[in-house]
Image (cartoon, rainbow, N blue to C red):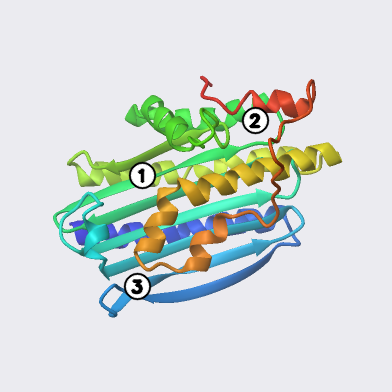
């Protein structure tokens, strides 16, 4: 039963990768995709699976990565003790994506959905979160409403939203979220593997509906130099989170993952200024107010 679920989940994320790819290409005819099918060795030097990395560049989507992987085998015993399972062998499959649009009126988005098996335990994790640069509150409400509806049959939205708010936070800067949240969960296992599988796959299927209508709505809007400058500074905060706090980055590096695929989440351009603050009274200052937890 578990082996079947693992195979089904791997096939599911590959199908979802293709669906998301087609959505992106339909919106951005200029989109270029560099696909790498890669393999890895496990900690003992044996064959350890691999994945499909798709790196995108275009006029609408400045840079993006939509990746799937299925890895297995021995892992560093010291790192193994930091996970939830037993022993020093692991299997993991999932999809991970990041989309950085060029237009500051369109938010950056991140999502991942994964299944992990280690020894006598297995679990699911993942979620989706939005990082906007312009205060279009109706877009933020729409994004959260999609996830509320998706979570409703499972009664999990409030808990997953709270987890997301707490996790995607640049704690070294106090309470400053990298965006306006979404949903996030980890180590999910209720004891009913079929039900858990259904929930995670159902949620993952809602990503397209949660994000691309926002892109289509904002893609032709004009923007100013001030809008772009703010976007680049907030992308800098995105980099800070991914390099300092993101557990997925650490997991990939500690399990002998493919470095270029792991770091594809970084934006093509970003900016840092000492003691940066948006101009007082500006639309950007208003946007800054949204980078704290709130109800949607």
User: On the picture, is 18 further left or further right than 106?
Assistant: left
Residue 125 percent location from the top left of the image:
35, 46
Residue at position x 49%, y 41% in the image: 128
> Mark 2 or mark 1, which has the lower sequence index?
2
Residue 244 percent location from the top left of the image:
48, 48
Q: Classify 42 as above or below 284.
A: below
Dot 2: few (<14), some (14–19), or many (≥20) neighbours within 10 Å? Answer: many
Labels 3 & 1 near each other (Cβ < 8 A): no
Q: Which mark is residue 291?
A: none
Residue 34 percent location from the top left of the image:
62, 71
User: On the picture, is 254 further left or further right than 236?
Assistant: left
Q: Which mark is residue 139?
A: 2
Mark-to-mark CA distance, 2 and 1: 24 Å
> Mark 2 or mark 3, which has the lower sequence index?
3
Dot 1: few (<14), some (14–19), or many (≥20) neighbours within 10 Å? Answer: many
Q: Secondary structure at mark 1?
A: helix
Closer to us: 34 or 268 = 268
Residue at position x 60%, y 42% in the image: 237
Mark-to-mark CA distance, 2 and 3: 39 Å
Closer to us: 115 or 43 = 43
> Mark 3 or mark 1, which has the lower sequence index?
3
Residue indicated by mark 3 = 49
Find residue 253 and report its image quarter. bottom left
Q: If the image is split into quadrants, where does the N terminus sit?
A: bottom left
Dot 3: few (<14), some (14–19), or many (≥20) neighbours within 10 Å? Answer: some
Mark-to-mark CA distance, 3 and 1: 22 Å
Mark 3, mark 1: which one is toward the viewer?
Answer: 3
Residue indicated by mark 1 = 200
Q: Is residue 222 visible?
A: no
């Amino acid at each position: 039963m578990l082996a079947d679920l693992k195979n089904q989940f791997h096939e599911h994320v590959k199908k979802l990768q293709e669906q998301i790819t087609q959505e992106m290409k339909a919106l951005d005819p200029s989109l270029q995709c560099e696909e790498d099918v890669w393999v890895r060795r496990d900690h003992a030097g044996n064959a350890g699976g691999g994945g499909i990395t798709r790196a995108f560049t275009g006029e609408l989507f400045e840079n993006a990565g939509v990746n799937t992987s299925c890895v297995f085998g021995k892992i560093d015993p010291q790192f193994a003790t930091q996970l939830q399972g037993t022993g020093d062998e692991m299997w993991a499959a999932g999809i991970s994506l990041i989309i950085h649009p060029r237009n500051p009126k369109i938010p950056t988005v991140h999502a991942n959905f994964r299944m992990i098996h280690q020894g006598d335990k297995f679990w699911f994790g993942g979620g989706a979160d939005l990082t906007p640069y312009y205060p279009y509150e109706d877009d933020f409400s729409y994004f959260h409403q999609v996830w509320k509806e998706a979570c409703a049959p499972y009664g999990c939205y409030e808990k997953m939203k709270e987890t997301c708010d707490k996790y995607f936070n640049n704690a070294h800067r106090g309470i400053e979220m990298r965006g306006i949240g979404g949903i996030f969960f980890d180590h999910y296992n209720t004891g009913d593997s079929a039900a858990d599988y259904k929930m995670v796959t159902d949620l993952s299927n809602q990503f397209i509906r949660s994000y691309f209508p926002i892109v289509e709505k904002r893609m032709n809007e004009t923007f100013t130099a001030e809008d772009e400058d703010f976007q680049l500074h907030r992308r800098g905060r995105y980099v800070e989170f991914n390099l300092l706090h993101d557990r997925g980055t650490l997991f990939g590096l500690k399990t002998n993952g493919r470095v270029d695929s792991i770091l594809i989440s970084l934006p093509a351009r970003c900016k840092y200024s000492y003691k940066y603050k948006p101009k007082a009274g500006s639309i950007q200052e208003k946007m800054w107010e949204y980078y704290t937890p709130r109800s949607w």
